[in-house]
Image (cartoon, rainbow, N blue to C red):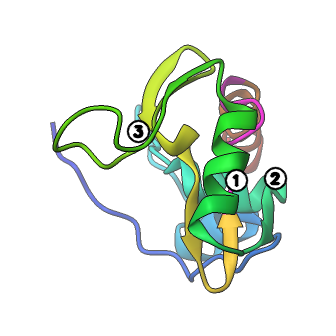
Amino acid sequence: MLITPLKTRILVPPKDNLLTAIQEALPNIPENSILAVTSKVVSIHEGRCVKATTKDAEDILAIRHATRYIPRGAMKGRPVLHTITQGLLMPSAGIDSMNGYTILWPQNPTKTAQTLWKWAKKSTK
């Protein structure tokens, strides 16, 4: 297997077009390729960004988006907010900060992956 990283332009929160960024960086996706995309750029594509506030406010957002959580500091030596979100164990419900925005976990990663696949199949044949 050959892994070739694809460098796109930086997607800018609160919303940017991931499909355009991929198309600009890679006009043709070779047959039998696997296109891997990070959750953060999917979130920016979906517009899942809010103006950044404090770490406490991010924790409140994470708790709101989590199915279950273990509070920050509840585990000795582990000052992270452990959460289960969309069936996945991840810190802070996948929430991250970038350029003054809090970026939430994608709304529906499976649906977005299907949309990307259909787009790539149609645009590159």
- For mark 1, what is the residue? 43
Instruction: Please give left or right for residue 40 compared with residue 125 in the image.
Output: left
Q: Nearer the viewer, mark 2 or mark 3?
A: 2
- Residue at image coords 65%, 32%: 113
- Say above or below: 56 vs 42: below
Regarding mark 3 in the picture, which secondary structure is present there? loop
Q: Position of residue 62 (x, y in %)?
A: 64, 43
- For mark 2, what is the residue? 46
Query: Does the image show residue 65?
Result: yes
Let me know if residue 105 is in the magenta part.
Answer: yes
Instruction: Please give left or right for residue 122 compared with residue 7 in the image.
Output: right
112 or 78: which is nearer to us? 78
Q: Are marks 1 and 3 in contact (CB under 8 Å)?
A: no
Gap in Å between the C-alphas at discs 1 and 2? 5 Å
Residue type marked 1: Ser
Q: Are marks 1 and 2 in contact (CB under 8 Å)?
A: yes
Q: Which mark is residue 33?
A: 3
